Image: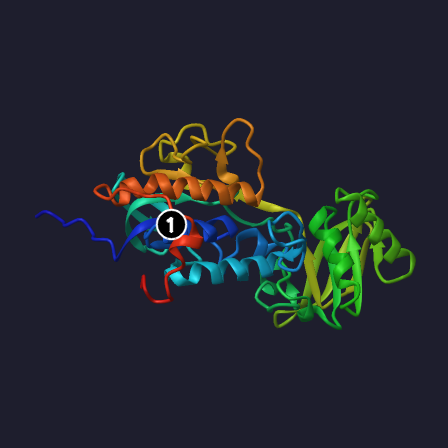
Amino acid sequence: MTVPTPQPAFSTDVAVIGAGPVGLFTVFQFGMLGMKCRIIDSLEAIGGQCTALYPEKPIYDIPGYPEISGGRLISALERQAEPFAPHFHLNQQVIGLEGNAGAFHITTSQNTMIAAKVVIIAAGVGAFGPKRPPLPNIETFEAAGPGLGVNYMVRRTKDFAGKRVVIAGGGDSAVDWAVILAGVAAKVIVVHRRATFRAMPESVRQLESLVEDGSVELMTPFQLAGVSGTDGTLQTVTIADLDGNARAIDADVLLPFYGLSQDLGPIRDWGLGDSRRGVAINPVTAETGRAGIFAVGDVAEYPGKLKLILTGFSEAAFAAHRAHDIVFPEEALHFEYSTTKGIPRPGDMS
């Protein structure tokens, strides 16, 4: 008896892997050329690192915005993509890709199956998650909610108002959030195993100023040694110096900022060439060595590549114009400025 091949539950012109800023702008660029998109992301919310790591941190190199926070940028890109009715498949990772240009079949970790004519890899650094400190029972406190227990990101500073916050780490995220939360939380304690920090000098200077005036307490050289509490409610963070001498700190929330665990995952097996640092593309078309598969944003590699959001935006435009030939092989593409063709009304592409 022949078992029939499972049929994809969804069909689209374009499957975009990654819902970060470049992935969202990809939806706009493809939508302007009449192509529908479905977007897959391993995180539970759109925005990639802008949402996960610095939603309230200012960005200064987005054209037209002298300053904009990561969260506001994602909201603006979401509104820009909205007329093209994108469909999001969140909290799942692409684990399988079969087929060729014009007829790809994608499978995700939630067993979602999508048929697409082209595939756009906008995965940034790949699927990522926080590096968890190796503490016993830390998972017990990870579901407490924003501003409580163990959090690996800050979505809204107001969630930490009046809380006793312990921040662990010595990079940009740890220092930046210590500076920001010093004016919000009841108490901020920074734990780092070294006396020096890896963050931007100006941010370190601000942290040192806050330590001097008593707004932030600095514990160095210390490292995390344990967490404890009752019924999933964090009450104490234990730290230890390099000699093993322990000290308990009363805390409502622990923010461990030890970086991200990043992995391209199954993308490495798609025959796209050397993917140790990313995916090699033709910088003029953003197409990989496999027809119908494109890469844009930080994951895309070529000589002289600048890993900036605005570079990814440009690559999305190149990819859209090349992909149009695959999605609509019988239709000639005539270049038009957005000021000439305008934007579809919401619902026109649903």
Which quarter of the image is occupied by the C terminus?
bottom left
Where residue 227 appears, x then y in whole percent?
69, 60
Residue 226 in percent (x, y) is at: 70, 56
User: Which of the pair 25/336 is nearer the observer?
Assistant: 336
- Tell me the element at label 1: helix
Q: Which sits in the foreground, 271 or 330?
A: 330
In the rendered view, does 26 fall on the left or right side of 196?
left
Residue closer to the observer: 265 or 25 = 25
Q: Which residue lies furthest to the right in this view?
A: 212
Which residue occupies the extreme left position in the image?
Answer: 1
Residue 338, relative to residue 151: is it above or below?
above
The answer to whether 58 appears left or right of 143 in the picture is right
Residue 121, quarter of picture: top left
Q: Which residue in the protein does label 1 denote?
A: 30
Q: In this view, does 103 lie to the left or right of 234?
A: left
Disc 1 crowd rating (10 Å Cα; few below 14, some 14-19, many 20+) is many
Name the residue at 74% across, 47% down.
Answer: 170
Up the image or down, 286 lies above or below 249; here it is above
Residue at 57% of width from left, 66% of height from top? 143
Q: Which residue is drawn at 37% across and 65% down?
A: 345
Instruction: Evaluate whether residue 40 shows in this view.
Output: no
- Residue under the point 26% across and 42% down: 332
Instruction: Answer with left or right where residue 179 lies relative to residue 279.
Output: right
- Total count of labels: 1
* Structure colour scheme: rainbow
Relative depth, front residue between 30 and 343: 343
The amino acid marked with disc number 1 is Phe
Q: Where is residue 41 in the image (x, y as percent from the top left)?
A: 44, 53
187 in relation to 93, above or below:
below
Picture coordinates of residue 137 (x, y %)? 61, 59
Q: Is residue 259 visible?
A: yes
